Each structure stands twice: as structure tokens, then as C-alpha cells.
Image (spheres, grey):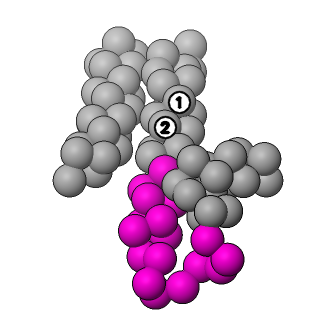
Amino acid sequence: MTRDDIIRMARKAGLFDVPYPHPTNSKEVECFASLVAAAERKACERALNELRGSVSMFATSKEARVHNNAVTCCVEAIRARGNQ
């Protein structure tokens, strides 16, 4: 995540609409944290999807299936975290 991404999310959350983050502005801080977490989940999901099918050419078909199933389970777990 780049500095610009973080600033964009902070603006979207309304953190620049208040003088400074303060416990009374917890709604904005929670919104910002939620946006950052969602961006991280999405980045992790993308990285895992790139691993799908990347098993060594010397792997057996069973090993390839196990690898791809593990990647799929990880992606599903990350998605589930976003729904909690």
C-alpha cells in the first residue's frame, strides 16, 4: 500500500475533516481502519491468486491439486475475515 493510498483512504474516511484524530472522532478512525484492512485483504487475495497454478512442473497432479486447494482455502479465509 502506498502513501497515496493511505491518504486517499483517510480522506474517504473523513479524517481530514477533523482537526486531528481524537477519541471523539472514533467513527472516522474506525472507518479508516476498516478501509485499510479491506485494502490489505484485497492485496493478500491478489497475491495468493498469483500462486494458484504455480506448482513446480515436476509436481504430480495430486501435489498440484493439494497446492491449489490450499491457496483456495487461504483466499476463502481472507474473504471470510472481511465478512466478520
For the residue pair 77 and 18, the one nearer the viewer reads as: 18
Q: Which mark is residue 42?
A: 2
* Tag nearer the camera, 2 or 1: 2
Expressed as whole percent of the image width and height from the top left, the position of residue 28 reads 47, 65
- Please indicate whether residue 68 sits to the left or right of residue 43 in the image: left
Crowd class of label 2 (few under 14; some 14 to 19; many from 20; radius 10 Å) = some
Work out whether 65 lies above or below 83. above
Q: How many marks?
A: 2
Q: Which mark is residue 77?
A: none
> With 7 as the anchor, is 50 left or right in this view?
left
Residue position for label 1: 46
Judged from this view, the residue extending furthest toward the bottom is 23
Q: Position of residue 54 (x, y in %)?
A: 54, 21
Pick whichever, 49 or 16, lies toward us: 16
On screen, 70 above or below 20?
A: above
Amino acid type for the residue under numbered disc 1: Arg
Is residue 33 visible in this depiction of the protein?
A: no
Q: Is residue 71 above or below residue 56?
A: below
**Residue drawn at (44%, 59%), measured in percent from left and top?**
31
In the image, the segment drawn in magenta is: 18-35
x then y, percent, for residue 24 = 44, 84
Q: Is residue 66 above or below residue 6?
A: above
Residue drawn at x 23%, y 45% is: 83
Of residue 63 and residue 43, the one placed in the foreground of this image is 43
Crowd class of label 1 (few under 14; some 14 to 19; many from 20; radius 10 Å): few
Q: Nearer the viewer, residue 11 or 71?
A: 11
Badge 2 amino acid: Lys
- Residue at the image position 49 percent from the left and 69 percent from the top: 29
Q: Residue 23: where, in percent of width, then height?
A: 46, 87
Query: Is label 2 in a helix, a strand or a loop?
Result: helix
